[in-house]
Amino acid sequence: MYLRFIRTFAALMIMCWPASALSQTPAPLAAYGALPALELVEVSPSGDRLAFIAVIGEQRTLVVMDMAAGKPLGRIAVGSIKVRGLQWIGEDRVLITTSTTQALPFFDTNPRELSVGQIYDPSTGRIADMLGSPNSLLNVLMGPTDVLTTPEGPLVLVRAYSFEERGGLDLYSVDPRNGRGRRAEYMSFDVESYVLDPSGRSVARADYDTRSREWSLRLRDGGLFRDVWKTTAPLDAPALLGLGMNGDSVIVAADRPDLSREGREDADFFDVKLDTGVWRPVRFEFSPTALLFHPATRRLIGASRLEDEGRHYVFSDHDAGNLWAAVEGAFPDQSPVLVSWSDDLKTIVVSTSGDGDSGAYHYLNLHTQKLSTVGAAYPSVPANQVAAVRPITYAAADGLEIHGYLTLPPGKTEGADLPLVVLAHGGPASRDAPGFHWWAQALASRGYAVLQANFRGSTGYGEAFLEAGYGEWGRKMQTDLSDGVRHLAGQGVIDSDRVCIVGASYGGYAAMAGPTLDRGVYRCAVAVAGVSDLRRMVAHEAEVGGRRDSEAVRYWNRFMGAERLGDRSLDERSPARLADRADAPILLLHGKDDTVVPIEQSRLMASALRRANKPFEFIELAGEDHWLSRGDSRQRMLTETVRFLEANNPAN
């Protein structure tokens, strides 16, 4: 069976790539900067149907396919709106979740990213707005949407805000036929998350009091809920994740040193019995970065871990294990990623990328032994122009081991005196991963080696590594990047005199901090949506949150190393306050609709560089958010970045 899969896969991959794959000419930047041509591929509960978003330019189309018949069941243009997710509602309807940037005057005047839902019926071609009725409901999704399979049919549940005199963020049942909402359960504003049983009733809730900073686990006791555990959590609050393996417990991620056992590593996840409230550690063969729950029963069935070479999976469920074994047999040495699967765990959609693959989605059905490629995310990037990416490790100045990825120009397997771009990730509590990265690949296509370092403070390498980043903005988090430059230069891979730094969000801060705090390393810097004035950024979070000690303020202070709101020591690590020290030209780009890092941060940096008479450019991206969700903005950013790099650090 596996051999048949592999042969089919190979044939499909040959068909997938355009004729331009035979050419050695670099793909145009537009091939990398365009929005993915295919995204959000979801298999139906039966496994017989697929829903996905196809993109041409800025225009998105929802497509529903009958995989058994090999024909489309329906399609509908959704335009340039930002689609954030697709979910099947039974076999006949698809929920489309989109977002817009706007303010809610009755909450506050600060713009935020708001999610709304629409339900598409391919048999009629009609769309129903979720929560469009009654008029007392705000038709904004105030949390994730749960779709359950019940004997009576699919059940759709989501939290919503009511304008009635009681108000509140209650749980509503949504009629899939017309989108109308009906209150299913009352919930207070303090309910942070919840777990539903198969009937759609919440059996566990997590409450968080923002003033006392107290997190509580509450379990259903008849018609009421009882507190079974509380803890004070200014940051790093526990998380209620889902049902346990047998359906009679819930899984909680928490720090419970009181449950430690001598000689055993502390557990990160716990199984809490619904009837007794007893806690039991849940352990895996590795330290997982994500847990996996059954698509129908919603019970815990496995875990995964993102490693340097790819994502690793382990399953406690027999059917899930068999399905994944078939996937690994069909995609040997390719590190496939689970995207969606059917209720019977016999059909799955996975994605692949890297090693001549610019990103593709594949459908595998064990019932029919059918493997087919749904499509490519970046079909205009030919296979021979997908640059090689290899994991690397090196020692920081203090000896800490840093992991990362090095992308070489297409066609090169070894580097020698190459120009380098340090591409710093955002977060900073995030990480870069293996596979096709459109930004890194675009830069590599222009002749640059690209270093993506998971500096201290990145996730995925353990709690100690994450905590090593606390207070290290502009300090060791910054020098972890330049230590990577020195490592590659020492190996002869890159030319240390031809290095620039690029990044977005926290990476934008790192890009600005390069020429101002870690001078003498970079010939230029490109900062996208970066933080330039740390003290002003924290003050903004306090204003938006309406409190000086909000969770967001505490988060920023911990990573930045501030003692309190308004801590002037942050000025010593704020590029906008050190602009007169800049020793390299800086390009600033920022979306005007950014609700995460306000555009004021780039404007402050531009003004400071102007006053200091330092070389810089500043480009404001109209209508763009923090994530470069618009294709034209992505392409503008990429074009301007490459132009700036080639002017200040030419590859040839």
Image: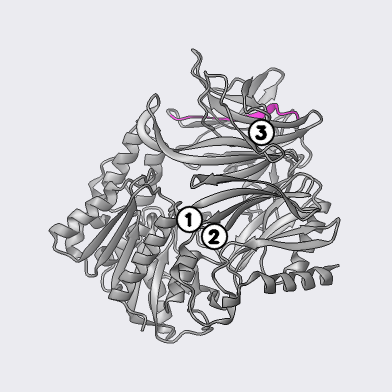
Classify residue 423 as left or right of residue 21.
left
Residue at the spot of label 2: 461
Q: Position of residue 248 (x, y in %)?
A: 76, 34
Classify residue 260 as left or right of residue 485.
right
SS of the residue under disc 2:
loop
Task: Give the prevailing secondary structure in the magenta stretch.
Answer: strand
Measured in 3D between alpha carbons, the distance from the residue under mark 1 to the one under mark 3, in whole angstroms, is 28 Å
Q: Position of residue 530 (x, y in %)?
A: 34, 54
SS of the residue under disc 1:
helix
Residue 23 seen anywhere in this rendered image of the structure: yes
Q: Is residue 501 above or below residue 286?
A: below
For residue 466, the mark is: 1
Write down the region rendered in magenta: 199-210
Along the line of sight, the residue nearer the viewer: 361 or 196: 361
Disc 3 marks a residue whose amino acid type is Val
- Which comes sooner in the sequence, label 2 or label 3? 3
Measured in 3D between alpha carbons, the distance from the residue under mark 2 to the one under mark 1, in whole angstroms, is 7 Å
Question: Badges 1 and 3: C-beta atoms under 8 Å apart?
Answer: no
Residue 201 shown in magenta? yes
Residue at the spot of label 3: 195
